[in-house]
Amino acid sequence: MDKLLRRVRMAEGMVARRAQRKNALLKRITQRKQNRKNGEAFTEAIQQRKAAIEARNEDWMLGPLAPRRELDEITLSNGNFFGSLSPTRALLESEVSEEEKKARVAWCGSPKFLCIAPGDRVVVTEGHHKDLIGTIEKLNTRNMTVEIQSEKLKTNTTVPQFMQEDSDKPVTQIYARLPISSVRLVHPLKDPQTGEYRDVIIRELRPRDIVHDRPTRTRSMRRFVPGENIIIPWPKQEPIKREDQPADTLRIDVDEKTFVPTLFRPPAPQQVLDELRNKYSIFRTRHTPEYIAQKEQEEKEKEAKKSAAKAMLTPIQEYNRKQRELRRARGQPVLTEEMLAKIGEVVARNKLGQQAGPQPKVKEETVAQIEKAVEQLSLSGEDAATTSPEQPKV
């Protein structure tokens, strides 16, 4: 079983690494496409600026002989008709980073808890349309832009060739989008002095009382002005009208119980269960008792083969094993009183020699006696000798 579990872990790790490499590749491809799109938009802006400078110089130099650029001819430098933008620039479709998203919505919460919604009245605080007040028609949370319903924000846009039909014009007007950082909320508040309601530009909003409803998977919260504790109500949203279609399931059919599970029969045939669970999958961790018993029996057979191989020993290996068993049965050696007395004499003599000066020489007879005693202690007789006439020669 350990081998099966190890195989499952290796397979899971392999799949995880493969998915990681795939995600990294997709991320690089997406980033490359986005960089190309951003580069095209930037190049288009530079080319239009150069074309505008050249047109201004020609109009000043030629006067009444200046060419008519409003004719239906595509400008070769940027691929758009005169006085029109590409849809990418008009709709701000270029991707933005997470840091830029947070910077765009810093005044109205965060990308996750956004404190503005379609239907709010806002004022433009930057750009050519500064001080323009309008209602938010659409809110794009992918790049944090808004589409304001105002005629002044309509922009001439060149329709792509694949979207044009025979009767369509090559240039159309669409509402240009603005980043959320370029607008501020406009809401009527009561003047404490006069008691009248007047429009006030709210420059900062924060969320509060965030409630997550798990059954419906919805989220509700309130927004307020920090420092003033003024609750700003959300714009009224029209309820979504849903019409029943012939393919829809009626509520009475949903509530009807058509299957009651029981313990007397399996929920599906065994063949179907094997197909659903994929019994031969490399990622399977739950196995039947029969399969587990089979694998355990295989492990036991392998262990039996290993033990049988250990039983086959050479004569020298058998002799060494027998000697080890004898030493193990003999136990630890024990020092006699005579051995301890002799060892004490040697230790005391060594200490006296270190204190008095040069160490006196020990008699060779005494050293030989101590060595002989230690050898007898370790061997405990002639039976424990490492060299004996019975030992086979190698």
Image (cartoon, grey):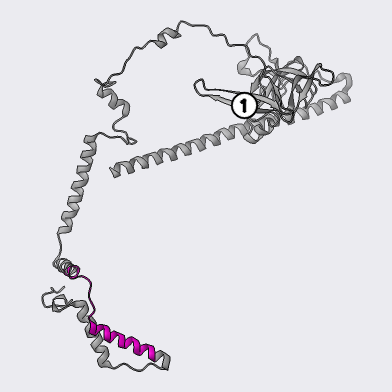
| Kind of residue at badge 1 | Asp
Q: Nearer the viewer, residue 316 or 358?
A: 358
The residue beneath circle 1 is 209
In percent of the image, x 32 and y 41: which residue is there?
Answer: 5
If the image is split into quadrants, where does the C terminus sit?
bottom left
| Left or right: 102, with 309 as reference point | right
Q: Quadrant of residue 39?
A: top right
Query: Percent position (x, y) of residue 279?
Result: 29, 31
* Residue 390 part of the magenta-drawn span: no
Query: Percent position (x, y) of residue 233?
Result: 68, 19
Residue projecting furthest to the front: 337
**Res 142 visible:** no
Q: Nearer the viewer, residue 144 or 35?
A: 144
* Helix, strand or loop for disc 1: strand
Query: Percent position (x, y) of residue 14?
Result: 40, 40
Where does the magenta region start and end?
326-352
| Left or right: 319, with 29 as reference point | left
In percent of the image, x 27 and y 87: which residue is there?
Answer: 342
Q: Quadrant of residue 176?
A: top right
Q: Nearer the viewer, residue 281 or 336?
A: 336
**Res 224 visible:** yes
* Residue 332 part of the magenta-drawn span: yes
In percent of the image, x 55 and y 25: which residue is there?
Answer: 212
User: Is 275 above or below relative to 296?
Assistant: above
State the count of labels: 1
User: Is 42 above or below relative to 5?
Assistant: above
Mostly what secondary structure, the magenta segment? helix
User: Is 206 above or below relative to 316?
Assistant: above
Query: Percent position (x, y) of residue 40?
Result: 66, 30
